[in-house]
Image (spheres, rainbow, N blue to C red):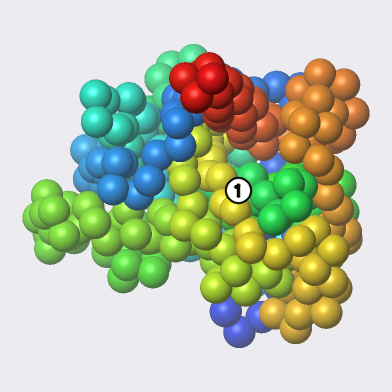
């Protein structure tokens, strides 16, 4: 679910292996973020063009570096034989267009993410070129309840990435949902030609939107039919590990109290990943995260809050302009 949990072979229990730590970060810089692209009006799915092609895959820096990556993975596997090398979309960039935005993606895998973004030498890879990083695309949802509150989760101490932090619901879109189960299968001839088709673009875009809804359902217990269609607010990145997220706003038809109740009682909730679900009012949420800096939130999610603040400001301007017209 949210960000990189240890990728487990399907037959093993997630709880059993949830203590396999993935990214080791220095906490003072964990909250540093950058906004890659702001879409403050909120972009519907039809407004995002997606180019997912082998041209946007990671480019190895050197043979020596690939040997080091393989050794990192072998070391992880020795410590935890249940680790599973799942595929992820690689974020290669996003740009605003007159009629929406364009997202450029490749395909990468968990092994490459561990051996590049999460390695001790991620900064030197980035200094050479961000093409050398796996930069697996994560997602994060600002989930608003019907009574104007925002849903937050306290991450467990056992999770692979950012333990004991406060986050919004999030995870990753999954290439495996589209039949790309390994980097090798992606590189096969058929997929290289498929990557050029409009149908492929639509499938990837659908998975990006659907994955966000799945994560919210799995992490909060809110049923799918209580969630409105996600709007994309843009892209943020955690400075540490150069970690990208696509950010969404999702409105929920249920009040805060009911969401708390579902989190506690729904059988499908991934309770091994979080220890608590709580709420803040919209304005309080923005203030606590960005101004008071009172919540231990990783940078990719703090960047998401900055995007949400832009959205709220634009909405307030639009409604005051409408009020002036009316009067």
Q: As rendered, which of 213 and 103 lies closer to the eye?
A: 213
Q: Quadrant of residue 30?
A: top right
The answer to whether residue 84 shows anywhere in this view is: no
Q: Is residue 218 above or below residue 158?
A: below
The residue lying at 41 percent from left, 54 percent from top is: 208
Residue, far front: 327
Residue 146 figure quarter: bottom right
84 relative position to 166: left or right: left
Q: Position of residue 313 (x, y in %)?
A: 60, 22
Residue 115 in sight in this render: yes
What residue is pinned by disc 1?
A: 141
Please give the name of the residue rendered at 61% of the width and 29% of the height, measured from the top-left corner.
Answer: 312
- Viewer-nearest residue: 293 or 27: 293
Residue under the image location 67 percent in, 36 percent down: 301
Could you classify mark 1 by the number of other residues whose Cα lies within 10 Å: few (under 14), some (14-19), or many (20 or more)? Answer: many
Q: Nearer the viewer, residue 87 or 140?
A: 140
Q: Quadrant of the C terminus?
A: top right
156 shown above or below 310? below
The quarter in which the N terminus is drawn is: bottom right
Q: Is residue 244 left or right of residue 299?
A: left
Q: Residue at x 53, y 44 (%)?
A: 248
Residue 267 point in image, percent of width and height:
75, 83
x, y (%) of residue 169?
67, 53
Residue 217, x across and y down, in percent:
63, 68
- Seen in the picture, residue 240 relative to 127 is either above or below; the reply is below
Q: What is the tally of numbered marks visible in this picture?
A: 1
Q: Is residue 207 left or right of residue 303?
A: left
| SS state under label 1 | strand
């Amino acid at each position: 679910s949210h960000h990189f949990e240890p990728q487990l072979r399907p037959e093993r229990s997630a709880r059993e292996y949830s203590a396999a730590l993935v990214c080791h970060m220095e906490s003072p810089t964990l909250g540093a973020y950058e906004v890659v692209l702001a879409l403050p009006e909120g972009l519907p799915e039809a407004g995002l063009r997606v180019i997912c092609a082998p041209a946007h895959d990671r480019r190895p820096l050197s043979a020596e570096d690939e040997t080091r990556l393989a050794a990192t993975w072998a070391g992880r596997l020795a410590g935890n034989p249940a680790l599973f090398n799942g595929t992820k979309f690689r974020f290669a960039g996003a740009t605003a267009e007159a009629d929406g935005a364009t997202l450029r993606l490749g395909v990468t895998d968990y092994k490459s993410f561990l051996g590049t973004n999460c390695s001790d030498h991620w900064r030197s890879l980035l200094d050479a070129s961000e093409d050398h990083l796996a930069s697996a695309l994560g997602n994060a949802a600002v989930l608003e309840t019907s009574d104007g509150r925002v849903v937050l989760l306290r991450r467990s101490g056992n999770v692979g990435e950012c333990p004991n932090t406060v986050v919004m619901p999030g995870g990753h879109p999954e290439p495996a949902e589209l039949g790309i189960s390994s980097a090798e299968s992606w590189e096969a001839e058929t997929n290289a030609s498929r990557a050029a088709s409009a149908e492929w673009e639509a499938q990837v875009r659908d998975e990006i939107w659907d994955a966000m809804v799945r994560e919210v359902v799995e992490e909060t217990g809110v049923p799918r039919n209580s969630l409105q269609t996600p709007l994309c607010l843009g892209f943020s990145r955690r400075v540490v590990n150069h970690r990208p997220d696509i950010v969404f706003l999702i409105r929920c038809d249920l009040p805060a109290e009911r969401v708390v109740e579902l989190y506690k009682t729904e059988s499908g909730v991934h309770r091994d990943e979080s220890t608590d679900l709580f709420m803040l009012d919209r304005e309080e949420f923005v203030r606590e995260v960005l101004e008071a800096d009172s919540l231990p939130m990783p940078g990719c999610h703090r960047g998401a809050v900055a995007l949400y603040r832009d959205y709220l400001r634009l909405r307030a301007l639009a409604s005051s302009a409408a009020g002036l017209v009316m009067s």
